Amino acid sequence: MRTSGTGMLELMAFSLGDQEFCIEVVSVREIRSWTPATVLPHSPDHVCGVINLRGAVLPVMDLARRLGLAAAEPSQESVIIVTHIGNQIVGLLVDSVSGIFTVSTDDIHAAPDVSKTMNKHEIRGMIPRDELMVCFLQIEALFGTIESEAA
Amino acid sequence: MDMNEIKEIFFQECEEQLAELESGLLRLNDGDTDPETVNAVFRAVHSIKGGAGAFGLDDLVSFAHVFETTLDCVRSNKLEASPDLLKVMLRSADVLSDLTAASRDGGTVEASRTSGLVAELEAYAKGQPLPGAAAPAAPAAPAPQSEAPESPVEEAPAPTDDSGFQPVPFSFDGIDDDDELAIGGGASVFTVRFKPRSDLYAKGNEAVLILRELSKVGELQVRCETDDLPSLDLLDPEGAYFSWLIRVETESDEEAIRQVFEFVEWDSAVEITAGADEEAFTAPDAMGEDQPMAAVPFDLSLLEDAPVVAAEAAAPESVPATQEPAQLAPANMPRAAKAIAAEAEKKEAAVPAVPAAPQTIRVDLDRVDRLINLVGELVINQAMLAQSVVENESGGSSAVNLGLEELQQLTREIQDSVMAIRAQPVKPVFQRMGRIVREIADMTGKSVKLVTEGENTEVDKTVIDKIAEPLTHMIRNAVDHGLEGPEKRTELGKNPEGVLKLSAKHRSGRIVIEIADDGAGINRERVKAKAIENGLITPEANLSDEDIDNLIFHPGFSTADKISDISGRGVGMDVVKRSIQALGGRISITSKPGKGSVFTMSLPLTLAVLDGMVVTVAEQTLVVPLTAIVETLQPEKSDIHSFGPSQRLIAIRDTFCPLVDVGNILNFRADLANPVDGVALLVESEGGGQRALMVDAIQGQRQVVIKSLEANYTNVPGIAAATILGDGRVALILDVDAVVTASRGQPLSPDMMLAATG
């Protein structure tokens, strides 16, 4: 959680299965459609592999698997959200992108302490939006430690 | 640009100056007597001192200053560049380099090292070679001024400060007897040769202004040398053709004259010698009659409003003034004469020289890398385009094909040119080795001469950065283990001074670096005994000489009986071999007992592209570096032998080689593939062991652009890097050594046993 108290945040919402998630727009570099990834040997389950992003080698993570949700087979409709995590660029595989919205930090509720698979530090909070509940992810916590996971 | 950036530039320049300094000193050591070399060396130290002063790096300034002072004595021919002096200077260059590094990265240089050298340098500068120089307190100028007639040569002034000025003892007896002493009793005569280069004018300086400035120092007699002036049709309007020969009579010292030229020093040849060069001044008079255009005595009073003594009067009078002292001060005058002679020689030789230095710009490496990345993408894009055209080819569109072909050629050319930007000569690394050799020779008490060859061979900067370490290690090994001590060498009838030859050359798209010593060669008996002792080989093993030589590359192998701090146990040649292999290179050794050993490294010219074999493994496309592959073969069923529960060996000619299923090792498939359905790549891995890597099929051979996996992900075991193929997909480049390491089980064969000890 930001300590700044009040302020507006611009967020990008996307869906995984029947759940809505969002991340900060500032960390999104671009969105592109799914292309088959080259499998990396000895990689964790949630690492789909690497793809060619205009000459750069981009690792793609299956976000659903990483969050412990049922993994859907990537299809033509799947999209890859290319994000900055630390000083690396990582692709996140999601089912679809729902849109961008702005929220006041006051409207972000603390996450309830229920989930076993989702660690609390991986979630920045819950945001009610159009009858839906959007889970605000802390992607740095999810993938910030790529190295230690893969090693 | 903030201070740190400027400082960074200063240190970059320092590195260049240090390289210049060392190469200059080495040239002097090899007997080069060109004054320009001394000047270059002096300039290097001077520039470092100047820059260091600006940044308040006091340690650096004070050491550079002492160094400069001594160099100045050499430059002005007051000190002969003897081998002993050069040795001190080379060590000083090392310390200067250390001080620079310490100033940049923090840390300190042992005070004892600097102070010792400072003392030695000062001893040289303060006139060790001059007998009368023991009284440093004696003032420089007053002695001849006050007591000119009585002052004998022996009481010649010694240097009073560390500015580097060392006045030449000069007797005025002869002058005093001569009533026609042109100037006051304390004047000394200097001959200045001033030859501006075109740079001087290009920078907005003007020779006349310099001469006018000089006229403030003393009385001048100036002759303009126009001999170099070409005929009009050959004349470069921006060229510099005139030089001036100036006789200065002044009460000031040489330093004062030098100061006048301070700002044009680098753009002109300035030679200041004590005494007059009479011949030069009398000659024009004789010539003057038949060649009225040639040399006109130049009266500077034209430039200055103040009247100055006209020039022509001085010439005949000053003849005795210089000839007599020449006899009275035999120890010193010949030096001046020699300098003039050297200058004359140099004039003959060096006038047409002064080649225009190729223009260079300093570019941030990141920018070049970005360009290289972009070109890499261009190459990939071009390949993708070509592939999609082939796929959609409905026939007949030859214009497209032609265009594509041209595009391909262009991209290849752009790639080559961009790679050439990163290409750097190996010279700086080779120069660093000179220092390593000196240090180790000192430590081991051996006398070693390092000969380098092909320093200008160019190779990618990353390769240069990475070969320094293995090279250092090999040089240390060669001096420590390869070369014998001087007594032993004399006993053997060899020159007591060992020769280490370091050479670089291009050969078939790779750079080959050789380190050859003329030492004892490899002691095969000892190597073999050691290998048996370490369990690397069985006593019965029948090994060829070459096999034995190659044993030194095995991990944990060191033949030195005693552990020295130079090449101690632990980091052996196996580390060298591994780092060379990590660069995609190979290393080999040839050795002749009693004659010496030659280590040969062959390295790729760049780390940005790689020649690879594209293969298919479990439906994945992989690239295997071509350098690792010894041969490819199609296994026959009869060649495959099961060994143990899960191991298989393949018979290749008369040896059995372990078969490694790449797909299985990389976890692409759980079960082992049938070798008969695939292709075996015989690879050489670290430790010299061979393995047969099983792949499903070979797609072809191609040059690929290396892309880092670490940039956005992390290191993947078994994978060295990634690349992008023509279809736009990412393909992984196999790390052959890692795969082989992963395949190691229990020691199964002598070969495996060798590898397993690592």
Image (tube, coloured by chain):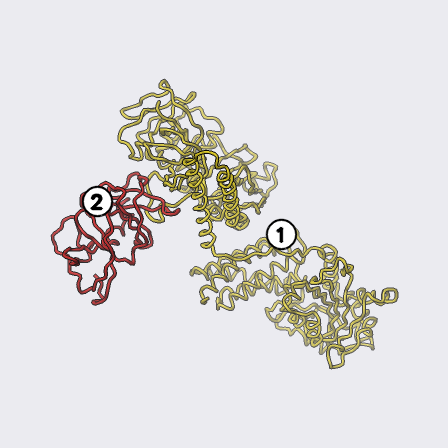
Chain colours: A red, B yellow
x and y percentages locating residue B64 in the rendered image: 54, 63
Judge by depth and name the residue closer to the eye, B83 or B450. B450
Q: On the image, numbered disc 2 is attached to which residue?
A: A65
The C terminus of chain B is located in which quarter? top left
Q: Spatial distance from mark 1 to mark 2, Cα to Cα?
A: 67 Å
Badge 1 vs badge 2, beta-carbon distance below 8 Å: no
Q: Nearer the viewer, residue A14 or B595?
A: A14
Label 1 amino acid? Arg
The picture places residue B113, in percent across and down from the top left corner, at 50, 59
| Amino acid identity at mark 2 | Arg
Which residue is more in the foreground, B687 or B698?
A: B698
For marks 1 and 2, give the one nearer the viewer: 2
Tell me which chain the residue with mark 1 is part of.
B
The chain that hosts pointer 2 is A
Q: Residue furthest right?
A: B290
Neighbour tally class for label 1: few under 14, some 14-19, many 20 plus, Cα within 10 Å:
some
Residue sticking out furthest to the top: B638
Residue B580 visible to the viewer: no
SS label for mark 1: helix
- Residue B491 sits in quarter: top right
- For the residues tagged 1 and 2, is the chain the same? no
Query: Which residue position is annotated with label 1?
Result: B27
Q: Residues within 10 Å of mark 2 (few under 14, many from 20)?
A: some
* Residue B577: image location, x then y, percent: 44, 39
Q: Is residue B757 above or below residue B607?
A: above
In the figure, residue B541 lies in which quadrant? top left
* Residue at image coords 57%, 38%: B518
- Give residue A72's quadrant in the image: top left
